[in-house]
Image (cartoon, rainbow, N blue to C red):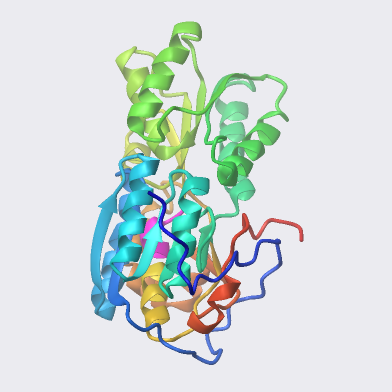
Amino acid sequence: MALPLAANAQGNGLTRPIALPAFDAAKQACSKPKGLRRELVFVQDNDREFVKGIGRGLALAAAERGLAYRVLRSDNEAALMVKQVNGLYANKTGSIVVAPIDPPSLSPSLKRMIGSGAYVGAIVPPPANTILNAPQYLTGKVLAESATAHIRTRLGGKAKVVLLTHDNLQFLAPRFTAMRDTLRQLPGVTIVADISPATIDKAGGYRTMKMILLAHPKIDVVLGADTVVLGALDALREADKARANQFLGGIDGEREAVAELKKAGSPYKASISLASPIFGYAMGRFASDWLDGKTVPQAMDILPKALTIANIGQYERDVADPRAVYADAARRKSYLRMYGNICFDSRDQYINFPWSSERKY
């Protein structure tokens, strides 16, 4: 049953795209929310490594700031996620971070949370007090450029390519547009499959690649999120179709993908890191700041990094200690950019449009 909109709900927020200035941490603080539990809840879509990395960062920040912390996992069930967020609203939870499964169905529940005065941080889709996004086109372009360099140098300029997309989630679609745009520049490239797996996890990638191999037994390049590409790699190995000169590349910098990069002869050649423990730690700090009456960013970029053998060591040290990265301004800026200001008193200014720093306003 749908919950009634709270009497103090903050309308529809900012629904028209606007350009946000740089975040100003020195802006004057405002009121503290009242009557809310001092806790942070992470509402996870599933249990993939990228999402678990967010949780590690959130848990670290919560422990430092004296916030009770817990996780609710929705297991790819959109209706369950709505029920969970409605329960947090009824429980007067003070702050949540969410990785939405179905943004339209979840939106009313998140708006109720915002109206209650709680902090809401969202991974990509609105609405939220703080939206976390990556420059999605740039993220896809960085991965595709690594793939095209490999095609030129190792595959003679020719390749059969599989794109495992998230095109059903419009906020991530630009990364795949960038891949298509970049691959189109090589006349010897044929995209033999351009498909969104039913679930964005290893099982989804595995099942989809098994189906593709029935029609195209020789695949040279596979691109997508790390979790689905790792599943595709399992299917290739099971079918004895994995080769050292293939290029499998993903986005998210998941630990299993990083481990594959280190293996001699692995088809896995690149992972574009979005350093989820680092931005998770930042969002955990924002949750605490919000409850303390401080201002927080309305939006935040997580900047893509192409992981290589040369830089994996430093990257692993960074994600293992996100607190140290956040405390070092130069290192923090290499991962994060923050935009806009919002606090409890200005919560009617929450982002309720598909925010991206790449948008031309």
Give how far across and how far down residue 232 sits, in percent: 39, 25
Q: Is residue 190 left or right of residue 246?
A: right
Q: Is residue 75 left or right of residue 100?
A: left
Looking at the image, can residue 304 be seen?
yes
**Nearer to us in this view, 113 or 46:** 113
Task: Decide: is 23 above or below 157.
Answer: below
Q: Residue at x 52, y 62 (%)?
A: 131
Q: Is residue 160 left or right of residue 119?
A: right
Q: Quadrant of the C terminus?
A: bottom right
**Nearer to us in this view, 106 or 261:** 106
Task: Decide: is 77 above or below 352.
Answer: above
Give how far across and how far down residue 337 sits, in percent: 56, 68
Task: Decide: is 72 above or below 22.
Answer: above
**Nearer to us in this view, 170 or 35:** 35
Task: Decide: is 184 above or below 349.
Answer: above
Q: Quadrant of residue 207?
A: top left
Give how far across and how far down residue 295 sits, in percent: 50, 82
Q: Quadrant of residue 133?
A: bottom right
Q: Residue at x 45, y 64 (%)?
A: 112
Give how far across and how far down residue 354 sits, in percent: 62, 54
Check if residue 202 falls in the magenta segment: no
Q: How many marks?
A: 0
Check if residue 275 falls in the magenta segment: yes
Residue bounds of the magenta highlight: 274-281
Q: Residue placed farthest to the bottom in the image?
A: 28
Looking at the image, can residue 258 be seen?
no
Q: Residue at x 72, y 21 (%)?
A: 187
Q: Main secondary structure of the magenta part?
A: helix
Q: Residue at x 26, y 57 (%)?
A: 71
